[in-house]
Image (spheres, rainbow, N blue to C red):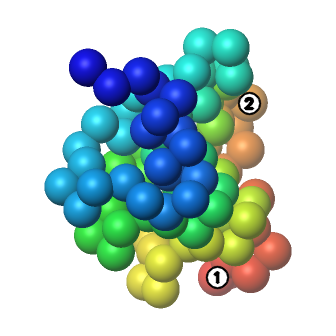
Amino acid sequence: MTDIMQFVEQARNGTLPPDFDQWHLSVPEWDGYTVAHVAARNGHLPPDFDQWEIANARGWTVAHRAAQFGHLPPGFDQWELANLRGVTVRDSYDHAPT
């Protein structure tokens, strides 16, 4: 099995294999941030990505991460996903529709 840090590095650089499907793999030392969180931060999620609800230990979802860094796709519609403190994706993104 490939080390998770290899997947994290590939997610950071946009070089994950096209058939990658282990988005939920997390790095415990990083508060449970997943491969999907890293890809979202860097704008490297595939166009058909649909697992926006994957969350870290504090409930921050992949959608929150993508919103924070301006990488939500056109047509994104899960604005009400919330973390453990009730902060929604809409709250995390300045350009969310009202």
Amino acid beneath label 2 = Arg
Residue 85 numbered mark, or none: 2
Q: Residue at x 68, y 20 (%)?
A: 31
Residue 69 numbered mark, or none: none
How crowded is the residue under tag 2: few (<14 C-alpha within 10 Å), some, or many (20+)? few
Residue 64 on image: x %, y %: 64, 52
How crowded is the residue under tag 1: few (<14 C-alpha within 10 Å), some, or many (20+)? few
Residue 97 numbered mark, or none: 1
Residue 75 on image: x %, y %: 43, 83
The answer, for residue 66, to whether it is visible in the render is no
37, 86: nearer the viewer: 37
Q: In screen coordinates, is 20 left or right of 47? A: left
38, 68: nearer the viewer: 38
Amino acid beneath label 1 = Pro
Mark 2 and mark 1 lie on one chain; the one further toward the N terminus is 2
Q: In screen coordinates, is 40 left or right of 53? A: right
7, 77: nearer the viewer: 7
